[in-house]
Structures are given as C-alpha cells and as structure tokens.
C-alpha cells in the first residue's frame, strides 16, 4: 500500500458539528463512523497516513445555487465575518485538534521529522491549517498563539473577503481573476508567515491574490486543493499561467477530489469516474512536472467520486494512477514526498 499524506481535509469541521450535536469528536475519530470521509479506522484502511487539517469558520449565509439549463452556476460570495465570533470558533476547532492529540488519536506535526515519525508509529500525521484568517486580527497577535498551538499552514482567505484579501466564488464557468488580491494587511500576514515558518496556501484566493503572494513570499507556491482550469473551468481551479508559476517556484498543487472541480461539466455528481481524476493529474504533471503534483482530497469538505467514497477508498486512486503508467518513485512523490519537501521548505528546515 502506498502511504498518502494529503494536502487538505475538513475532518475538524465534521467533528466540530459532532461536538455541537452533543457527540464526542474524539470517540468518533477513534472508533470510526459511517458519516463523512475521515476517521482513524478508515484512514488506516486506505493508507491515509496523514494530512493538512483545516480550521474553517462556516459562513452561515452560504447559498447553494442550482445550475441553470446550461449547467452554469455562480454562488454569491458570503458576507465577511466578524473577528470575535470567528476566533471563538477557531479556538473550538483547535481544541478538538489538541484533544485528538492528547488521546493519541492523531499527532499534530510541526516538522517533517514529526510527520515521518508519525508514519513510522502508525499514527495519523496531522498538520494544523487555517482556511481563511477571520480569527486573526490585523495585529497578528492570534497568529503567534495559534502558531504556538501547532498551526503550520494557512490560507489568508476562503471564498469570501476578509481584512487580508479577496476570495474567488464557486462558479462555473468562470476565470479565477474575479477582483483584487491581498490588502496591505494581507501582505503583512504573508511576511509574518515567512518569518515564523507557516506554509501559505493559495487555494480560494483570487488570481490577483495569487500573484500578490507569489511576488511577496519566500516559499514555494502552494495550492493545496485545486485542479487544472484548462480541464474544468471553475473559478477555484488554476490557469496554465498559475500552474507555470507553481512549477517555477518548485511548489505544489494538490488534486482536489471535489467532483465540481474534476468534471468537464463542473457539476456536483458522485458518479464521476476515476479517469477524471487521472486526467487532471496527467495534465498537472505534464505542465508542472512530477515534483510539483500531489493530492489534496478535500475529504469531509466536498462531494467526491463514489468510486473513492471515503478515506478507506483512497488506494483506488493510487491503483488508477499505477494503471495509467506512473512508476513507483513517481507515485511516492505524488502521494507524500512532494508534500514533505514543500512543507520542509516553508518551515525553514
Ligand atoms: Zn477549501
């Protein structure tokens, strides 16, 4: 079995909902469940050895718009969030992550040595991420505290605007060039991440924001869960020009399993064949090279192909890639080694 370290999951979001329904998030992760995609037993079964786990502040007003008769859709961007309630929610997510660590259910990794040690010990290697920095104020005080709690990756924005920058909407077909990029506070956030050694994720930011980060950061460019816009023209996918910039920085693009970002028609439909996933990987490898392509499932955050179904089915993608001709060393890079290289660079190892 090929061990996988995956660039993006929302398991903490599912466990946060469990907690608010009166359930026990740690027990759910340890004992397993049928809900969602990731828990300890299913991760083990599918060779999912670890991944980047997001703190994410839900937008209460997020509205799913049905596609029109041409299959086109555009979800309105949700309203900006207030900082104080966002901080409360971010603390709840971090608390669940820390409880999982104390229970031995997973390990919060702060270095690639930590990740490799967790692999060797057979413990899920989690890297704490923040997907949209609404919990952090312009003074960046909270950034220091979250860093101390284990935060090692962040995206300045989710698909909405905040004090640091502008996000892209969920829309098909649409260019990612939907408006302005980083704000002055956003540039300061990028510099602070460079100083501290926090990976900066470009998923969900506008194309202008992508270029603003690219010209400011000293890290390889990271798009943790995005695909090729040339194949699926959703605003969240990367244009050829962006893919070329990732390659030039020796960065990384993690394949998002969301069917909306895989299918040529951009629709949410679990009956999406594995061949759509392989086609995006092929395209990204062709364009960016084998060293810059990886996985970024979006487990627990999206509708994924039924053939994968959940973390336990993760090796089906590995098998499909093997059948498509990827050699053992190439699979190791796609499945985990590229992520370890890029995170090591972002973390100043
Ligand atoms: Zn996302």
Image: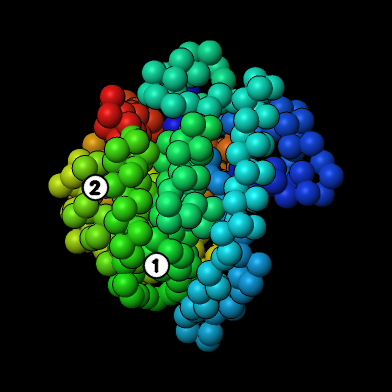
Residue of label 1: 166
Q: Quadrant of residue 345?
A: top left
Q: Quadrant of residue 303?
A: bottom right
Element type where label 1 sits in the image: loop
CB contact under 8 Å: marks 1 and 2? no
Residue of label 2: 217
**Which quadrant is home to the C terminus?**
top left
- Measured as percent of width and height from the top left, residue 310 is found at 60, 42
Q: Quadrant of residue 28?
A: top right
Q: Is residue 339 rendered to the left or right of residue 70?
A: left
| Residue nearer the viewer, 29 or 345 | 345
- Measured as percent of width and height from the top left, residue 44 is found at 59, 26
Element type where label 2 sits in the image: loop
Identify which residue is drawn at 29% across, 56% down: 187
Neighbour class for label 1 at 10 Å: few (<14), some, many (≥20)?
many
Identify which residue is drawn at 31% across, 72% down: 180
Between discs 1 and 2, the one toward the N terminus: 1
């Amino acid at each position: 079995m090929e061990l996988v370290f995956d660039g993006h999951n929302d398991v903490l979001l599912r466990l946060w909902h469990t907690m608010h329904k009166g359930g026990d998030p740690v027990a759910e992760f340890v004992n397993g469940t049928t809900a969602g995609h990731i828990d300890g037993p299913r991760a083990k079964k599918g060779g999912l050895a670890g991944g980047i786990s997001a703190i994410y502040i839900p937008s209460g007003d997020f509205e799913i718009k049905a596609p029109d008769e041409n299959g086109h859709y555009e979800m309105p961007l949700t309203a900006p969030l207030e900082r104080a309630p966002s901080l409360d929610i971010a603390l709840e997510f971090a608390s669940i992550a820390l409880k999982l660590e104390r229970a031995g259910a997973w390990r919060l990794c702060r270095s690639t040595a930590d990740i490799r040690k967790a692999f060797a010990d057979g413990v899920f290697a989690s890297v704490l991420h923040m997907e949209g920095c609404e919990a952090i104020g312009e003074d960046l005080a909270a950034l220091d505290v979250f860093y101390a709690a284990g935060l090692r990756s962040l995206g300045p924005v989710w698909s909405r605007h905040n004090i640091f920058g502008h996000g892209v909407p969920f829309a098909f077909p649409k260019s990612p060039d939907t408006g302005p990029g980083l704000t002055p506070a956003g540039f300061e956030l990028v510099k602070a991440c460079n100083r501290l050694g926090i990976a900066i994720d470009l998923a969900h930011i506008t194309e202008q924001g992508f270029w603003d980060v690219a010209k400011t950061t000293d890290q390889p460019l990271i798009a943790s869960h995005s695909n090729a816009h040339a194949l699926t023209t959703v605003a969240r996918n990367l244009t050829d020009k962006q893919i070329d910039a990732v390659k030039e920085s020796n960065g990384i693009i993690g394949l998002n399993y969301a069917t909306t970002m895989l299918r040529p028609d951009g629709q949410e439909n679990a009956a999406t064949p594995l061949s759509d996933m392989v086609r995006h990987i092929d395209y990204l490898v062709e364009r960016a090279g084998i060293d810059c392509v990886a996985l970024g499932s979006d487990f627990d955050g999206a509708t994924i192909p039924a053939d994968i179904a959940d973390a336990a089915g993760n090796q089906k993608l590995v098998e499909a890639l093997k059948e498509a001709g990827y050699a053992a060393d190439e699979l190791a890079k796609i499945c985990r080694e590229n992520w370890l290289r890029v995170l090591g660079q972002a973390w100043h190892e």
